[in-house]
Image (tube, rainbow, N blue to C red):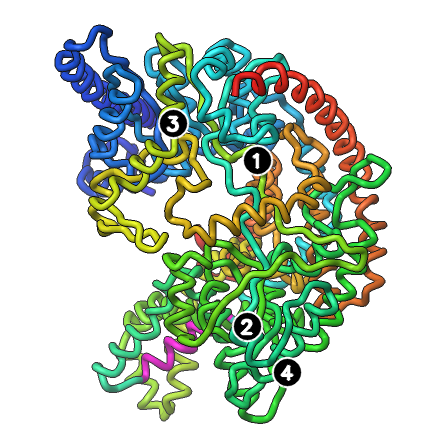
Amino acid sequence: MLEKRSLLKDVVRDKYLYLLLLPGLIYILIFKYIPMYGLIIAFKEYNILMGVAKSPWVGFLQFERLFRTPDFAQIFSNTIIISTLKIIWGFPAPIILALLLNELRRMFFKRFTQTVIYLPHFVSWVIFAGIIVIFLNPVDGFVNYLIVQFGGQPINFLTEPAYFRSILVITEIYKEVGWGTIIYLAAISGVNPALYEAAVMDGANKFRQMWHVTLPSIRNVIVILFILSLGNILEAGFLQIFLLYNPLVMDVADVIDTYVYRRGIVDANYSLGAAAGIFKSVIALILIVTANKIVRKAGGEGLW
Amino acid sequence: MKKAAMIVVILSMLVSLAACGGANETNNGTDNAAGQTGQNGEKSPLQISMTLMGGPKTPNAWSESALEADLEKNLGRKVDIQPIMLPGWDQVQTKINLLMSDKKSMPDVVWYLGSMTKEYDNWAKSGVLVDLLPYLQKDGKNILQYYSKETLFYSWDKTGKFYRLPGDVAEPSAMTTILRKDWMDKLGLKKPETVEEYIDVLRAFTNGDPDGNNKKDTYGLSGPTEWRSFAPILYAYKSDPENFMVQPDGTVKYGAILPQTKQALKVLQDMYKEGLIDPRMIANTDGTKFDEIVQQGKIGSFYRWIDYFNPSSIVAQGFKANNPSGELMYIDPIKGPDGFSSDYPEQTGGWCFISVTGKAEEPGEVVKVLNQMASPETYKLINFGRENEHYKIENGEFKTLVNPDESAKLGLGNFSWYISRKDEANIKNTPEVMELFKKRAETSQPLRELRVEFKSLDRPAWKEYSTDINKLRDQTFYGIISGKLSIDEFDKFVNQYYKMGGQQIEEEANRLYKEQKKEYEEYEKWYAEQIETNK
């Protein structure tokens, strides 16, 4: 570095760019940082009447209550298992789909397909879960209709612990895969065409081009998105699970978020809910930082 | 950055303050106008501000002026109602707290949620609320006659004062066992009275092809996924798995752990195995979805709303449209092995309340107004409009003459939950349905006597342990019914219950129950002296 530029100078020179940044900063400040003040209720016994400031301090009692919950081990492992499954199956899916879309030759068909596969993303989980329940229901659901037509016995899918997690993973992929391709398609379109031409000259077929040109070119994007998805490992998908689970699959379906909802919000243990939220955030932070370190050590470009 | 944030915060506060100020000003504006026009009478017009939550919340609506005219006619004094429309459900509590935090913004009459016990306690203790007893004794006949003794207990203050009135109390029981009458006739079945007879009927509904399409596509019992859907079996066995129940020895125990619950679950398990229970009933079916299932017309029996027998009910209309020859019928609650039977009792205390605050200069006059609003005529006027202008009654059946938009513009329902009448004054009910409500009030009495409705919301042990216990209860019980778990799991659940804090819950419940019983005895004495003589 030849010259140490002061931040102020930077700001003055690029004032319009910083002005563009300002709304985003204000948004994050107001809606993300200021509310963090409320986190202190995780260390208090929050009482609505006394308010945040006057409620008594209890140290780590809320965390103890959380960990002492009889089902905590089960809830925690459910969370990890469901979100790991979602990452294993759900993370590669948009990459593959983006690669396939990229090979489409008719522009109209490509655009049309893209639009159609984006659509489920915009349908709220409430509606989507309703559709799933109707399709899978054992009395007149479409899936069971097919099973019966082929001579099988109807299956009450949503009450079978053996099927429940698969249903979560499949429906999540179905809903989000199209939306997930957007970033990858953008990255792919940025690949230098000269590389493909060179590969063709070397006799690479379409598959080889994909493997040796496209994938390495978008590697950074894949890594960054992977790190970010690790940060969500304790988010198994509250709405989806909450709308689909039932007492018969609780053993495999109850996750931290649904538990916090029932105990923290419905039964008004707000401090416990806040403690669970902090617990989740800390784990997510550790995972992101570690993954980022590993990636950088291995020579890749991390998040920062 | 910090400064900027502060500025933003301050600005947003100023904006909200300005909004409040604006609202107040408009209110004052109408005050003055009313004050000037109302100087003809001897007394100055009575001004009453009240918080309103129900209906379309239309400002300056027809219902308001109609009420004012009606009050003037009946009380002989000009009344100026100043409604304060409360915001949506998620903000209503905050808004009420804000209004009540300052004498200036306080309404004369405040409407609030039953869940706001702590706020109510605070207001009562700090002397913000007016003791209504003397005024009710003098001018509150409609109110005192309408609400039952049991209901008013939940509004009574231990010190013998009366700081609040229930705003809305559901009918004592709003549900009934329902059967497909046309299927009964077709299969030549007789009305079931006992559990065995009921199961026989369900069996015939399931296997006898009652819809005549040569397919086995009908189910006996169905309902949304909730415990009261199983009422015909559970309640017949004297089991209410969601509430504390009084035991023969005078103690109270959680209904889910009682031995009769095990018996009932065994019966339900066998029924499920035999295919008499709709498999949708044990998971992921909510009330709305079940309403659709009813309308499809493939189920024979369910435990649901009495309102389905009102021709104006949307479910009844949908059912009729899909099944022109279909007909529903209601039966008395099914009798269990020892002859016990009961319908589902609703909460007696009410879910929202109204109080008169110290802001009211003439609380006696305010009570007169409330009492008039509780009269059948005025209740009908402000909730349904004028007969033959806004609605008509044909063969005892209520027919509206205004569409929903017009109704909202008129402000019909603006004054909901200010002592809502569920008797004949609720003319949307046909006489048959009205009769049924009365009958169900009686048939739900057995369970009402057994079930404990806690007046105190201060239940720390319950709050701490009930989430985990109820999760295990639902897992175990639905597991047993669906046949995934053996009936012996019930005993494990009971053991587990005591280990998971059930011991503390039970002790707490018994303590509260004893206190409440004593309180009720005092209340009864007080009621006989203060209310009975003034009814």
**Sequence-first tag of 2 and 3:** 3
Instruction: Please check whether the numbered discs 2 and 3 fall on a single chain.
Output: yes
- SS category of the residue bearing label 1: helix
Whole-angstrom CA distance, mark 1 to mark 3, is 20 Å
Whole-angstrom CA distance, mark 2 to mark 3, is 45 Å
Evaluate if marks 4 and 1 touch, with contact meaning CB atoms under 8 Å apart: no
Q: Is residue A282 visible?
A: no
Crowding at dot 1, Cα within 10 Å, few <14 / some 14-19 / many 20+, comes out as many
Instruction: Please check whether the numbered discs 2 and 1 fall on a single chain.
Output: no
Start-end of magenta stretch: A90-103
Which kind of residue does numbered mark 1 sit on?
Answer: Tyr
Q: Nearer the viewer, residue B427 or B231?
A: B427
**Camera-nearest label, 2 or 3:** 2
Which kind of residue does numbered mark 2 sit on?
Answer: Ile
Instruction: Please check whether the numbered discs 1 and 3 fall on a single chain.
Output: no
Which kind of residue does numbered mark 4 sit on?
Answer: Asn
